[in-house]
Image (cartoon, helix red, strand yellow):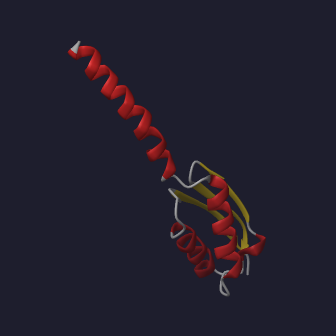
């Protein structure tokens, strides 16, 4: 009887804990929207035309910038967005 009770308790804990853990995760769509907005509104980066891809919190940036500092800034701004796990910066510097 004790074994059944213990199994039942652990099963209930698993059912309750799984949705709570998932609730803290930010969706890729939300990350995409936040990155697009942050880069598009930045007066230095002017990243409204960047191609942005998000998969499991990994953000890939593609496009052209005029200076290396803009490339670095775009990456740093992206890293500050909630839910971003990693940034793959494929921006190309073309003066």
Going by the picture, which residue comes out furthest to the front? 1
In the figure, residue 4 lies in which quadrant?
top left
In the figure, residue 71 lies in which quadrant?
bottom right
Location of residue 59 with respect to 13 vertically, above or below: below
User: The N terminus is located in which quarter?
Assistant: top left
User: The C terminus is located in which quarter?
Assistant: bottom right
Q: Which residue is found at the position 45% from the left and 46% from the top?
A: 20
Q: Can residue 79 be seen from the camera position used here?
A: yes
Location of residue 51 with respect to 47 vertically, above or below: above
Going by the picture, which residue comes out furthest to the top? 1
Q: How many marks?
A: 0
- Residue 60: where, in percent of width, then height? 64, 58
- Residue 12: where, in percent of width, then height? 38, 30
Q: Which residue is found at the position 67% from the left and 61% from the top?
A: 32
In the figure, residue 41 lies in which quadrant?
bottom right
**Lateral position of residue 3 relative to residue 70, left or right:** left
Q: Nearer the viewer, residue 49 or 8?
A: 8
Q: Nearer the viewer, residue 56 or 90?
A: 56
- Residue 91: where, in percent of width, then height? 67, 67
Q: Which residue is found at the position 40% from the left and 40% from the top?
A: 17
Going by the picture, which residue comes out furthest to the bottom? 43
Location of residue 61 with respect to 7 vertically, above or below: below
Q: Can residue 66 be seen from the camera position used here?
A: no
**Lateral position of residue 77 relative to residue 1, left or right:** right
């Amino acid at each position: 009887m004790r074994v059944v009770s213990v199994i039942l308790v652990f099963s209930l804990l698993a059912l309750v804990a799984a949705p709570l853990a998932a609730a803290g995760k930010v969706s890729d769509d939300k990350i995409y929207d936040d990155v697009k907005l942050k880069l598009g509104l930045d007066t230095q980066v002017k990243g409204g035309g960047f191609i942005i891809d998000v998969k499991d919190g990994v953000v890939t940036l593609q496009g052209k910038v005029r200076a290396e500092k803009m490339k670095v800034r775009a990456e740093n701004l992206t890293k500050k967005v909630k839910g971003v796990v990693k940034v793959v910066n494929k921006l190309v510097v073309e003066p």
